[in-house]
Image: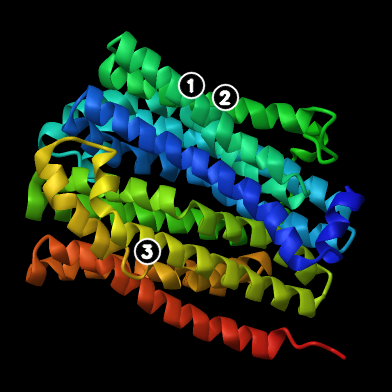
C-alpha cells in the first residue's frame, strides 16, 4: 500500500490528478451514459410519462444509496489522512466500520421504503399519470439499492488507496449490464417499466458484488476483515461528521427534487417534469469530466493535508480548478451551440423538442464557474473540516436553489425554474471562492 499511496506525496500534482481524474471521469461518463440510454429507451419504447416516472423515482433510490456514498466519502477522507500519517491500523479500522454501517443502514432504509412506498412516491411528486409507472418501477429497483449503497461506499475507498481503475470499473460494469438488460427486457421481452426496473436493479447488484470481490481478493492491500466490523464509536463519530455531509447534501437534493417536481407540475404539468428529466440527464453526462477532476482531487488533497505539506495542497487546489474550469467552459460552448441536437437524442416528441432546448440553455448559463465551488467544498471535506465542508456543499441546492425554485416561478412562470440554476451557481461560487481564499491565506501557509 505504501508504494502506491506514497506517490500522493511525491509525484507531480498534474500527473497525479490525471491518473486519478481520468478513471473517475470515465466511470462517471459510463454511468451517465447508462442513465441517458435508460431515459432514451423508456422514452422511445415505453412513453413520455415513463421519463417523468424515472425522474421521480431515481432521486429516492439515490437518497437511500447516498448512505453508502456518504460513509464512503467520509471514511475515505479519514483513510487518506491516516495513510498520509502512515497509520495503516486506523485505515483498516475505519474501513471495517464503513462496511458495517453501510449494510445495516441501507437494509433498514429499504425496509422503510418498501413499507411506505405510496406515501414516498407522492411526496417526491408522483402526480397524475406518473403514479402508475413510477410505482411499478420503484417496487423493482428498491431491492438493488443495498448493492448500490455498498458500491458507493467502496468506490471512494478504492481511490483513497491508489486504485482508481477499480473505482472506474465499479461504475462501468453495471452501466454495461443495465444497457444490455434494458434492450432484452424492454425491447425484446416487452416488460415495460417492470423490465426497466429489473435491469436497473440487477445492474446495481453487479456493481455491489464487484466491489465485494475487490476487497476480498488479492488485488488490494485494504481488505474486508471481520474483526474490524465491530463499531468503534470514536471512528463512527469521525465518519459520520464527514460522511454526513454527503448524506445531508443528497437529502437536500431530495428536498429540491420534491419542490422541483411539484413546481414543475403546477406551472407546466407532466411535460415539464419530463423536460427536467432530460436536462438532468444532460447535466450528469456533460459535466462528467468536471466531477472526475473533483473526485481525483480528494485523495491527493487529503493525503498531503495529512502529511502537512501545504505547498502540495495549494498546488492541487490550483491545478484542479484550472483543469476543471477549462473543461467546463468547453462544455458550455457545446451546449450553447447544439441544444436542439442534444434534446433530439432523447425523444422525438414534438412538444419536448419545442420546449426543452431553451430551458437547457438557461440552466447551463453559469457552467464555466462551477469548478471553483466543487473544488472549494471538496477541499474542506478532504481536510476533515466538517462544518465548512457541510455549509459550502449545501450552498447551491440548499441555500439558493430551493428558495429560488420556490419564489421565481411566481413571477416568471416555468422559466423561473430554469433561471434558478445559473443564479444559484454564481452565488454559491462567489461565497465558496471567498472562504477558500481565506483558508489558503490563514491555514495553508508555507513554512520556508
- Marks 1 & 2, CB-CB < 8 Å contact: yes
Which of the numbered marks, if any, corresponds to residue 231? none
Percent position of residue 284, x then y: 41, 49
Judge whether residue 68 can be spotted in this image.
Answer: no
Residue bearing mark 2: 206
Give the left or right position of residue 260, taking residue 187 as reference: left
Compute the Cα span from label 2 to label 3.
36 Å
**Disc 1, SS:** helix
Quadrant location of the C terminus? bottom right
**Disc 2, SS:** helix
Percent position of residue 126, x then y: 19, 39
Point 62% across, 53% down: residue: 73
Point 51% across, 73% down: residue: 372
Give the left or right position of residue 374, taking residue 215 as reference: left
Compute the Cα span from label 3 to label 1.
37 Å
Looking at the picture, tell me which residue is in the foreground, 286 or 221: 286
**Disc 3, SS:** helix
Point 20% across, 43% down: residue: 274
Q: Nearer the viewer, mark 2 or mark 3?
A: 3
Residue bearing mark 1: 202
Give the left or right position of residue 434, taking residue 404 as reference: right
Percent position of residue 293, x then y: 59, 59
Which of the numbered marks, if any, corresponds to residue 333? 3
Give the vertical position of 127 relative to 191 (above or below): below
Compute the Cα span from label 1 to label 2.
6 Å
Looking at the picture, tell me which residue is in the foreground, 217 or 339: 339
Badge 3 crowding class, 10 Å Cα cut-off, few under 14, some 14 to 19, many 20 or more, is some
Q: How is the image coloured?
A: rainbow
Percent position of residue 221, x then y: 85, 40
Amino acid at each position: 500500500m505504501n508504494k502506491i499511496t506514497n506517490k500522493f506525496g511525491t509525484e507531480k500534482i498534474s500527473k497525479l490528478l490525471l491518473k486519478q481524474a481520468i478513471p473517475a471521469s470515465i466511470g462517471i461518463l459510463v454511468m451517465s451514459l447508462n442513465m441517458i440510454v435508460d431515459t432514451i429507451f423508456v422514452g422511445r419504447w415505453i412513453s413520455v410519462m415513463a421519463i417523468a416516472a424515472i425522474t421521480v423515482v431515481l432521486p429516492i433510490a439515490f437518497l437511500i444509496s447516498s448512505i453508502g456514498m456518504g460513509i464512503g466519502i467520509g471514511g475515505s477522507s479519514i483513510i487518506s489522512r491516516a495513510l498520509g500519517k502512515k497509520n495503516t491500523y486506523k485505515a483498516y479500522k475505519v474501513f471495517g466500520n464503513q462496511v458495517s454501517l453501510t449494510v445495516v443502514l441501507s437494509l433498514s432504509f429499504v425496509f422503510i421504503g418498501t413499507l411506505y412506498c405510496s406515501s414516498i412516491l407522492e411526496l417526491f411528486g408522483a402526480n397524475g399519470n406518473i403514479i402508475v409507472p413510477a410505482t411499478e418501477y420503484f417496487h423493482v429497483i428498491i431491492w438493488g439499492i443495498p448493492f448500490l449503497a455498498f458500491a458507493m461506499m467502496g468506490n471512494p475507498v478504492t481511490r483513497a488507496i491508489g486504485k482508481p481503475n477499480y473505482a472506474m470499473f465499479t461504475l462501468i460494469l453495471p452501466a454495461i449490464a443495465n444497457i444490455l438488460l434494458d434492450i432484452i427486457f424492454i425491447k425484446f421481452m416487452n416488460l415495460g417499466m417492470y423490465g426497466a426496473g429489473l435491469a436497473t436493479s440487477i445492474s446495481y447488484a453487479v456493481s455491489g458484488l464487484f466491489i465485494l470481490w475487490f476487497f476480498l481478493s488479492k488485488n488490494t492491500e485494504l481488505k474486508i476483515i471481520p474483526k474490524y466490523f465491530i463499531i468503534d464509536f470514536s471512528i463512527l463519530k469521525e465518519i459520520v461528521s464527514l460522511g454526513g455531509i454527503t448524506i445531508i447534501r443528497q437529502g437536500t437534493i431530495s428536498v429540491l427534487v420534491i419542490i422541483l417536481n411539484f413546481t414543475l407540475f403546477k406551472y407546466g404539468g407532466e411535460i415539464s417534469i419530463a423536460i427536467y428529466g432530460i436536462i438532468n440527464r444532460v447535466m450528469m453526462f456533460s459535466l462528467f469530466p468536471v466531477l472526475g477532476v473533483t473526485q481525483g482531487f480528494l485523495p491527493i488533497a487529503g493525503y498531503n493535508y495529512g502529511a502537512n505539506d501545504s505547498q502540495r495542497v495549494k498546488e492541487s487546489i490550483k491545478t484542479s480548478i484550472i483543469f476543471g474550469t477549462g473543461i467546463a467552459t468547453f462544455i458550455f460552448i457545446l451546449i450553447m451551440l447544439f441544444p436542439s441536437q442534444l434534446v433530439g437524442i432523447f425523444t422525438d416528441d414534438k412538444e419536448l423538442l419545442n420546449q426543452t432546448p431553451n430551458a437547457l440553455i438557461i440552466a447551463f448559463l453559469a457552467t464555466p464557474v462551477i469548478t471553483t465551488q466543487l473544488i472549494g467544498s471538496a477541499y474542506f471535506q478532504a481536510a476533515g473540516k466538517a462544518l465548512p465542508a457541510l455549509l459550502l456543499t449545501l450552498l447551491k441546492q440548499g441555500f439558493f436553489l430551493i428558495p429560488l425554485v420556490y419564489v421565481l416561478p411566481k413571477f416568471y412562470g416555468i422559466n423561473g425554474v430554469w433561471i434558478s440554476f445559473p443564479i444559484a451557481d454564481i452565488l454559491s461560487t462567489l461565497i465558496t471562492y471567498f472562504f477558500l481564499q481565506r483558508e489558503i491565506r490563514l491555514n495553508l501557509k508555507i513554512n520556508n
